[in-house]
Image: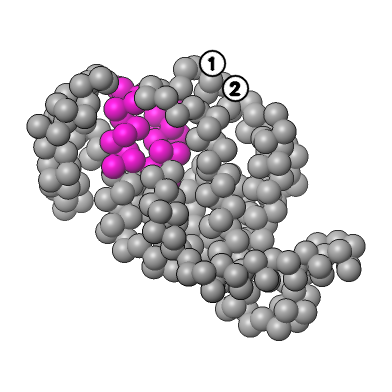
Amino acid sequence: MGDTVAYAEQYQEAYGAGEYAAAGAAAAVLSVAEEQRHLVAYAPLVKRIVRQLNSQVSGAIDRDDMEQIGLMGLLEALRRYGVPDQSFGSYASLRIRGAILDELRRQDWRPRAVRQESHRLRDSVRALTRRLGREPLEAEIMAALKLTPEAYQEYQLAENAELIASFDDILQDSLGQADSAPSPEEQLMVRRSLEQALRTLDEREQRVVQMYYEFELSYKEIAAVLDLSDARVCQLNKMALGKMKAMLQDK
């Protein structure tokens, strides 16, 4: 009940009737009351996505602020989509996640020194991979780069945050940026493309991607399910998204 009241209050504060009339005239499929009702109904989706992303951005944005941004992404999804149906959840997830990632990019959430260090580590891992002729193990990376387990996990999280942002950009582009919901044909094409990309992954990579995107589990939760370290889950997710991104860009 508390969450319901909080989201209703946030909606009233950010999107009063006057602003709704001005901004939503072109796509006024839902009334203000209907929008508010659907926002409350899909509030748990916003919270899940915020919880999922929050662990990857090192507190760059306050969690309450992330929820507010996600709520605005949800509202945009409602106004583009219209009355929610069984496909709306997947569409809204992309819009919510995209709104939060856009704000992170706008705020330049990683200081330049941190980005430079991440690029240095990335180049070192690539050099190690070439030298070994295979993907290096976690222990080999930490030994070669003289990283503590904590530092290695931070590196993996930063790498994943960048890759997830760019992967989500591809999905957003696939759905189109017009002020309307994707057609059933567009949704089917995107789904088929994703299914083809998923088939290029091995079994563990598929499970990681499915648990992250479909079931919206955090890395820590995925690690517990698969009995792996958080860093290993990060690494699997990075490899999987890299393969899928390459395939989707080639289509």
Residue type at numbered disc 2? Met
Q: Position of residue 141 (x, y in %)?
A: 74, 74
**SS class, disc 2:** helix
The quarter holding residue 231 reads bottom right
Q: Which residues are magenta?
A: 72-97
Q: Cα distance, mark 1 to mark 2?
A: 6 Å
Kindly identify which residue carries mark 2: 189
Q: Residue at x 32, y 38 (%)?
A: 74
Can residue 227 be seen in this snapshot? no
Name the side, left or right, on which 139 lies relative to 82: right
Can residue 61 be seen in this snapshot? yes
Q: Position of residue 238 (x, y in %)?
A: 65, 55
Question: What label does residue 9 carry, if any?
Answer: none
Residue type at numbered disc 1? Glu
Kindly identify which residue carries mark 1: 185
Is 78 part of what is drawn in magenta?
yes
Q: Is residue 42 above or below residue 186?
A: below
Name the side, left or right, on which 159 lies relative to 44: right
Residue closer to the observer: 195 or 28: 28
Question: Pointer 1: residues within 10 angstroms few (<14), some, or many (20+)?
Answer: few
Q: Main secondary structure of the magenta part?
A: helix
Q: Is residue 240 above or below residue 219?
A: above
